[in-house]
Amino acid sequence: MEMESLRELYVDELKDLWSAETQITKALPKMMKAATNPKLKKAFNTHLKQTERHVKRLERIFKELDESPRGKKCVGMEGLIKEGQELIKEKPEADVLDAGLIAAAQHVEHYEIAGYGCVRTWARLIGEDRQADLLQETLDEEEQTDRLLTDLAESEINIEAEEGGEEAQTATRTRAKQGNRRSTFRNGGSSAENGEMEMEEESDEETIGVSSGRSGMM
Ligand SMILES: [Fe+2]
């Protein structure tokens, strides 16, 4: 009886993963299109092909179990994908968007890693070793993708996003200083109040620039 209920839980989680994977096959082309960095585009493309294999592996398992993969929508994955799409809609600066896309993709990967880790373990427990091996193969690929994304983020993309932020800050400072000079000229050198306002704006923008530049991956 206990084994039966674990089997039911196993099938239920497999359905969840099948729904998640099919949603990812639709989301990845959009992420690939939105990305600018060629290595990131390639990573998304490679993972799309892997994901198509993950769907097939799951379908093979369902066939063995004589069950249907349909009947459940993975709302967790739906939410994660929606967050990624919202980021794209915000149209951030290209390097910042790339850093954000990595973060979105890693949320997806970690969700899948948790799911595959569970079903792999349950498959062994209920004596489905061949299925456990297949699930382990997918789990390995999800973990590889996660590591690849971390490497890409740490070696260049986060750095480019941070440098972009610094450039924007420099431009803001230059504009603010020019603004000060202009207002001084316009007001015949007696615009201390305007000058102070400009300085306040500058420091505000600087604070925002720094925090958004540092946000991103882990
Ligand atoms: Fe996958």
Image (cartoon, helix red, strand yellow):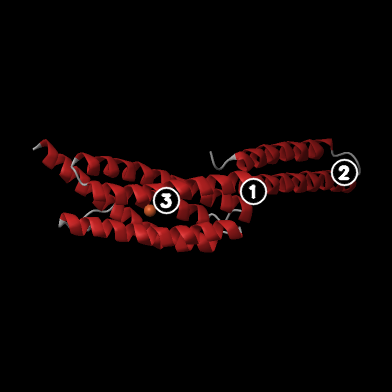
Q: Element under label 1?
A: helix
Q: Residue 210: in sight, yes or no?
A: yes
Q: In this view, does 72 lie to the left or right of 138?
A: left
Q: Does the residue labelled 3 lie within 8 Å of ligand 1?
A: yes
Q: How far apart are the two marked residues, 2 and 3, measured between alpha carbons?
A: 61 Å
Label 2 vs label 3, nearer the camera: 3
Residues at circles 1 and 2 in contact by the CB criterion of under 8 Å: no
Check the image and name the residue furthest to the left.
Answer: 1
Residue 203 to residue 89: above or below? above
Camera-side residue of 111 and 211 = 111
Q: Please tell me which residue is depicted at 54% across the width and 60% down the height of the picture.
A: 42
Q: For residue 198, what is the image quadrant?
A: top right
Check disc 3 and report the residue beneath it.
141
Q: For residue 66, what is the image quadrant?
A: bottom left
Label 3 vs label 1, nearer the camera: 3
Q: Element under label 2?
A: helix
Check disc 2 and report the residue beneath it.
184
Q: Which amino acid does label 2 sit on?
A: Thr
Q: Earlier in the sequence, mark 2 or mark 3?
A: 3
Q: How far apart are the two marked residues, 3 and 1, measured between alpha carbons?
A: 22 Å
Q: Residue 36: in sight, yes or no?
A: no
- The dot on residue 156 is 1
Density class for disc 1 (Cα within 10 Å; few <14, some 14-19, many ≥20) is some
Q: In this view, does 96 lie to the left or right of 164?
A: left
Q: Please tell me which residue is depicted at 60% across the width and 50% down the height of the picture.
A: 96
Q: Earlier in the sequence, mark 1 or mark 2?
A: 1
Density class for disc 2 (Cα within 10 Å; few <14, some 14-19, many ≥20) is some
- Which image quadrant: the N terminus? top left
Residue 59 to residue 14: above or below? below
